[in-house]
Amino acid sequence: MDIIDTASMPWGESLVPQRSDDAYMAHKRLFEGDENSPDNYMLVLAREPNSYFSPRHRHPWDQVRYCLDGQIPIAKGLFVEGGEIAYFPENTYYGPQEGGENRHVLLLQFGGASGRGFIGPDRLKQARAELAETGTFARGVYTRNKPNGGRINLDAYEAIWRHVKEEELSYQPMLFKTPTVMRPNAWSWQSTKVPGCSRKQIALFPHRALAIDFYRLESSEHTQTCDADQMRFLFVTEGAGELAGSTLTKTLTKGSAIRMLAGESATLSTQSTLEYLCLSVGLIEPRWH
């Protein structure tokens, strides 16, 4: 189990220069998985400008975006607003992404149910540099000149995927026609069996065993247990408290991020109020832990 105080972390370089070269674009790398596992993942905080542009596209992996403030454009006239959370399944088109407001986003990307995995930021950066030797990236598109004249245009991520995997990218049939945008503030808190602990069960997507929940503790404590076939990420949205695991005890504040791997347990407690997001993802390959 790991915990990060994201508020004290400096902003790092943009992980998506193939999409936007705006100086405002930046990321905080929180947690990352195993590049060689179909369950590879990346959890980051993103700072995105309204000048960010991405053409209509899709990915061979899954992602969840929690808009902390501002607006995330996901289609013409459609935004994920501050406080909303959206699920983008693999193979599902979205975009173009253009306009909206400057925003801060908690972003989780992870290998989809197809088992094709996810390309981590370091391998992605290396692939961009290698591809830049024979082509150019601009506004989310990779362009390469053909030896006999003419040009080839590919979505930037698709070009990187082909380069890394050394194979053509064939998409499987879409399970979801569009991304799903959820509005947690419209949910009512529901009491649990634990006194002082309330919960909002926002969504469950069975094909990937993705569960999205919010918890609120009021002068109480609650134990989170990560099952043997899942990984879990917690993110404190309001209040303060304490986390106690088998090997650590840490203070929790707004912006604290916690990673729990298979079989781990942690007790979150507060003397006042503590609210947090819980993202649980089922493992495609439980053995990799």
Image (cartoon, rainbow, N blue to C red):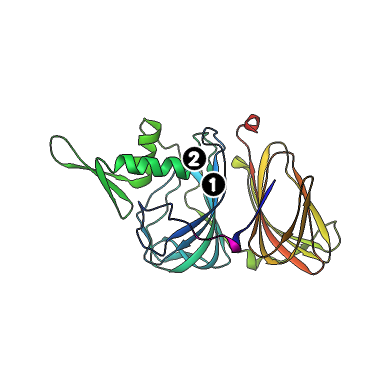
134 vs 160, nearest the viewer? 134
Task: Examine the structure image and report whether residue 106 is included in the region drawn in magenta.
Answer: no
Task: Provide residue 148's location: percent of width, then percent of height.
Answer: 13, 35
Q: Residue at x 60, y 34 (%)?
A: 284
In the figure, residue 214 lies in which quadrant? bottom right
| Residue 283 seen | yes
Query: Compared to 47, does 205 lie above or below?
Result: above
Q: Please name the amino acid that badge 1 sits on.
A: Met
Residue bearing the label numbered 1: 42
Secondary structure at numbered mark 2:
loop
- Disc tally is 2
276 vs 29, nearest the viewer? 29
The stretch in magenta equals 7-11
| Residue 91 seen | no
Quadrant location of the N terminus in the rendered image: top right
Q: Residue at x 35, y 44 (%)?
A: 128
Task: Provide residue 48's location: percent of width, then percent of height.
Answer: 44, 63
Q: With 277 as the anchor, is 143 left or right in this view?
A: left
Residue bearing the label numbered 2: 118
Q: Please name the amino acid that badge 2 sits on.
A: Phe
Task: Provide residue 103's location: percent of width, then percent of height.
Answer: 48, 66
Query: Compared to 213, does 1 lie above or below?
Result: above
Q: Residue at x 45, y 36 (%)?
A: 172
Q: Residues within 10 Å of mark 2 (few under 14, many from 20)?
A: many
First in sequence: mark 2 or mark 1?
Answer: 1
Q: With 137 as the anchor, is 31 left or right in this view?
A: right
